[in-house]
């Protein structure tokens, strides 16, 4: 899977688990924006230090509310379908490495029920577009084969100790009301600047 499809999987609805979900996104052409420009904008905001480094995360749901709602569904097939969707979502493990050169490595693992594991990775550009005391919003961009750049905006809530990130997971309507989130913890690793391989399975 190329980087474009990976970012679509992560940020535009986890299409493999949401039936009928369209993971396509419009292509946005950005004139005159290269890696050095992105890095300069990150530095000018002064918050990139809060993100740079390695983060490992997992998907979470409000299980209590979900279980109560699931019990009200009378159709057994529909109940099983939604339960499998929730299990697949909760199986997601993600590794992020925000680098000081304005690139970000993303690795994702999904363990869908009764299916083979899905493991994919990508490298994109990133920049901070806004921030406040408790949140940082970044813009991810990736150059496509046709020369255009594709963008996706993502807002992270950041803890006061700067060691935990949380973001809302944009998934299908079946799970939206159960607080689907990706929760990340900073990892203290050596040689991050050398670009280590992220292994999300360490969460398990």
Image (cartoon, helix red, strand yellow):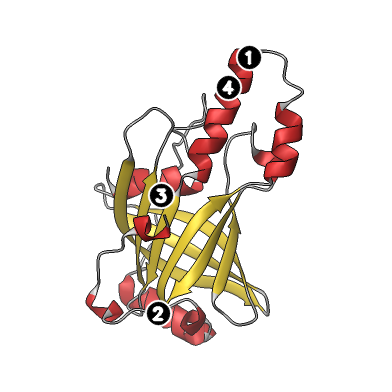
- Residue 74: x and y, percent? 72, 14
Which of the 4 image quarters holds residue 39?
bottom left
Q: Mark 2: few, some, or many residues within 10 Å (few <14, many ≥20)?
A: few
Q: Which residue is mark 2?
A: 188
- In whole angstroms, how far apart are the C-alphas of marks 4 and 2? 39 Å
Evaluate if marks 1 and 3 touch, with contact meaning CB atoms under 8 Å apart: no
Q: Secondary structure at mark 1?
A: helix
Q: Mark 4: few, some, or many residues within 10 Å (few <14, many ≥20)?
A: few
Question: Any mark on residue 123, and which?
Answer: none
Nearer-N-terminus badge (1/2): 1
- Residue 188: x and y, percent? 40, 79
User: Depth-wise, is mark 3 or mark 4 nearer the camera?
Assistant: 4
Nearer-N-terminus badge (1/3): 3
Q: Secondary structure at mark 2?
A: loop
Whether residue 37 is visible, yes or no, is yes
> Could you tell whether 188 is left or right of 58 in the image?
left
* Residue displayed at 53% across by 82% down: 47
Image height check: is 42 above or below 141? below
Q: Which residue is mark 3?
A: 7
Q: Check the picture and name the quadrant holding the N terminus.
A: top left
Evaluate if marks 4 and 1 touch, with contact meaning CB atoms under 8 Å apart: yes
Q: Check the picture and name the quadrant holding the C terminus.
A: bottom left
Nearer-N-terminus badge (3/4): 3
Question: Any mark on residue 76, and which?
Answer: 1
- In whole angstroms, how far apart are the C-alphas of marks 2 and 3? 25 Å
């Amino acid at each position: 899977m190329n980087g474009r499809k990976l970012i679509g999987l992560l940020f535009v609805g986890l299409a493999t688990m949401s039936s009928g979900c369209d993971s396509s996104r419009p292509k946005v052409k950005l004139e005159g924006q290269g890696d050095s420009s992105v890095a300069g904008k990150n530095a000018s905001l002064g918050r990139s230090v809060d993100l740079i480094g390695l983060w490992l995360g997992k998907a979470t749901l409000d299980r209590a509310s979900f279980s109560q709602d699931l019990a009200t569904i009378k159709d057994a097939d529909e109940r099983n379908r939604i339960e499998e969707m929730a299990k697949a979502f909760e199986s997601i493990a993600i590794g992020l490495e925000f680098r000081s050169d304005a690139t970000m490595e993303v690795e994702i693992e999904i363990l869908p029920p009764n299916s083979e594991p899905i493991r994919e990775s990508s490298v994109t550009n990133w920049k901070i577009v806004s921030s406040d005391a408790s949140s940082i919003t970044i813009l991810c961009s990736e150059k496509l084969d046709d020369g255009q750049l594709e963008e996706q905006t993502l807002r992270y809530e950041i803890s006061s100790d700067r060691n935990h990130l949380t973001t809302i997971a944009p998934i299908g309507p079946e799970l939206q009301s159960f607080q689907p989130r990706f929760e990340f913890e900073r990892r203290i690793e050596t040689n991050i600047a050398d670009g280590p391989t992220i292994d999300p399975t360490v969460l398990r």
